[in-house]
């Protein structure tokens, strides 16, 4: 049957193929634990193609690195790992840099590099990255410090912004596994937000521009992520980076890399973020043509917290039938992130979805060391009717 092919999807089609992605995926940087030293080990591969500089340092004196790419008039500022333990978008930034290096003759990539100048800060919070914490070394959430500017990292971001006067800002983050895109059993593999510019959540032309780009990205990614793209609530908080820059009339887009079922290393999500970045930059590079109606932004379902990592349904505990919700806690151990299962809730019925479900079918549930099953305990091994079950992700 004949159907109209979306032109924009068509332009990006080759670039979005698995074959093309495998070519540009920067495999030297993988997993969840990404720090400055990972970056430093790969500088040689990029130093001839990009200008790498150190615009500032962290609380503990670690360099904050910055990459420049492209020669165009449209200035784009992007930063990742403002929250140190949110590394998926950093991996995607390296895939993006690799695509600039390896396939710059590809039409949409050359268009991006000719029309835009990109300033990329892959790890804004290197101390938090090393310690695998959200906050910086002074235990401050940098994304709440854009007005007070008490911390060297947030101060640096504002200085780079003030010097550059970017036309667009991309604020790159990870979100937890708990989020669903809307109320259906669809995990929010990617979420976006155009932060508010004021308390009234006004929509001016700058905000419309970022809404239109987000709607466009959702369109370009629709075959990969049908129903798995969410939208964050836009309550205004001027202390956040996005709200501050949007308030200063810079269209700003928040990216949140989320959970693809089973993909705790976030290597599939990383690919989706790469595609989203390509789509976003392509649309920015085309500036005032191919605009998607900004109202489509509101068609994206709003994020809700409807997922657990694992739910054991109908288990017999102390003579009662109970549902048990388990969340994996991310713990840094020997340079790797371990996912430690912890009981979050025990209830007669848990009205949530899970990335993994076990139907205990009223069998007796025990812990391997016979300790009491309660909330907030770690459960590496559980026993269902004398059968040992290892609680692992994946
Ligand atoms: Zn974050």
Image (cartoon, grey):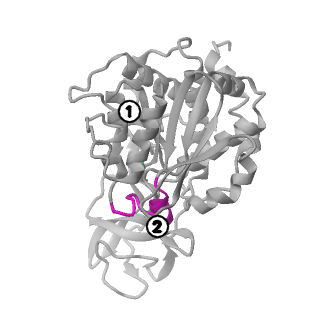
Which tag is nearer the camera, tag 2 or tag 1?
2
The quarter of the picture where residue 361 lies is bottom left
Q: How many marks?
A: 2
Image quarter in which the C terminus is found:
bottom right
Where 377 sits versus 78, above or below? below
Residues drawn in magenta: 125-139
Quarter occupied by the N terminus: top right
Percent x, y of residue 74? 55, 23
Q: Residues within 10 Å of mark 2 (few under 14, many from 20)?
A: some
Q: Is residue 392 left or right of residue 319?
A: right
Residue at coordinates 56% horizontally, 13% vertically from top-left? 290
Residue 183 visible somewhere in the drawing: no
Q: Measured from the top left, where is residue 100 in percent x and y?
A: 71, 36
Between 290 and 161, the residue placed more toward the observer is 161
- Look at 30% across and 34% down and name the residue there: 234
At horizontal 42% and vertical 66% (from top left) the residue drawn is: 329
Query: Residue sitting at 26 percent across and 35 percent down?
Result: 235
Q: Work out whether 326 lies above or below 14.
A: below
The quarter of the picture where residue 308 lies is: bottom left
Residue 387 appears in the figure: yes
Q: Main secondary structure of the magenta part?
A: loop
Name the element at disc 2: helix
Q: Residue 39 location, x and y as percent? A: 63, 56
- Residue 217 as seen in the image, left or right of residue 11: left
Q: Are marks 2 and 1 in contact (CB under 8 Å)?
A: no
User: Is 43 within the magenta?
Assistant: no
Disc 2 marks which residue?
A: 131
Cα separation, mark 2 vs mark 1, equals 34 Å
The percent position of residue 169, horizontal first and vertical second, equals: 46, 32
Q: Residues within 10 Å of mark 1 (few under 14, many from 20)?
A: many
Task: Please name the residue that numbered disc 1 is placed on.
Answer: 301
Q: Is residue 130 magenta?
A: yes
């Amino acid at each position: 049957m004949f159907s109209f092919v979306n032109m924009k999807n068509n332009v990006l089609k080759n670039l979005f193929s698995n074959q093309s992605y495998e070519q540009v995926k920067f495999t030297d940087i993988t997993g969840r634990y990404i720090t400055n030293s990972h970056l430093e080990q790969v500088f040689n591969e990029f130093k001839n193609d990009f200008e790498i500089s150190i615009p500032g340092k962290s609380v503990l004196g670690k360099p904050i690195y910055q990459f420049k790419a492209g020669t165009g008039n449209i200035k784009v500022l992007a930063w990742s790992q403002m929250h140190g333990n949110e590394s998926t978008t950093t991996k995607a930034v390296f895939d993006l840099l690799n695509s600039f290096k390896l396939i710059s003759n590809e039409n949409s990539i050359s268009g991006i590099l000719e029309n835009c100048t990109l300033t990329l800060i892959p790890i804004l919070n290197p101390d938090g990255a090393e310690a695998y914490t959200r906050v910086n070394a002074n235990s401050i959430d940098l994304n709440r410090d854009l007005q007070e500017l008490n911390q060297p990292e947030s101060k640096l971001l504002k200085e780079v912004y003030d010097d550059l006067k970017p036309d667009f800002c991309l604020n790159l983050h990870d979100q937890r596994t708990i989020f669903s895109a809307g109320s259906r059993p669809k995990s929010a593999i990617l979420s976006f937000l155009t932060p508010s510019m004021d308390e009234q959540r006004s929509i001016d032309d700058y905000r419309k521009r970022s809404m239109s780009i987000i709607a466009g990205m959702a369109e370009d990614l629709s075959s990969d992520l049908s129903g798995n793209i969410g939208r964050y609530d836009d309550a205004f908080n001027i202390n956040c980076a996005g709200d501050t820059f949007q308030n200063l009339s810079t269209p700003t887009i928040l990216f949140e890399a989320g959970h693809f079922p089973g993909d705790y290393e976030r290597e599939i999500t990383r690919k989706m973020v790469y595609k989203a970045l390509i789509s976003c930059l392509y649309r920015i590079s085309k500036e005032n043509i191919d605009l998607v109606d900004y109202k489509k932004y509101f068609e994206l379902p709003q994020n809700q917290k409807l997922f657990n990592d694992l739910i054991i349904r109908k288990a017999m505990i102390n003579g009662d039938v109970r549902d048990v919700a388990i969340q994996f806690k991310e713990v840094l151990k020997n340079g790797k992130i371990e996912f430690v299962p912890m009981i979050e809730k025990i209830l007669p019925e848990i009205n949530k979805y899970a990335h993994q479900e076990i139907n205990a079918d009223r069998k007796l549930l025990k812990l391997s060391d016979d300790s009491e099953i309660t909330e907030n305990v770690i459960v590496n091994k559980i026993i269902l009717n004398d059968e040992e079950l290892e609680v692992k992700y994946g």
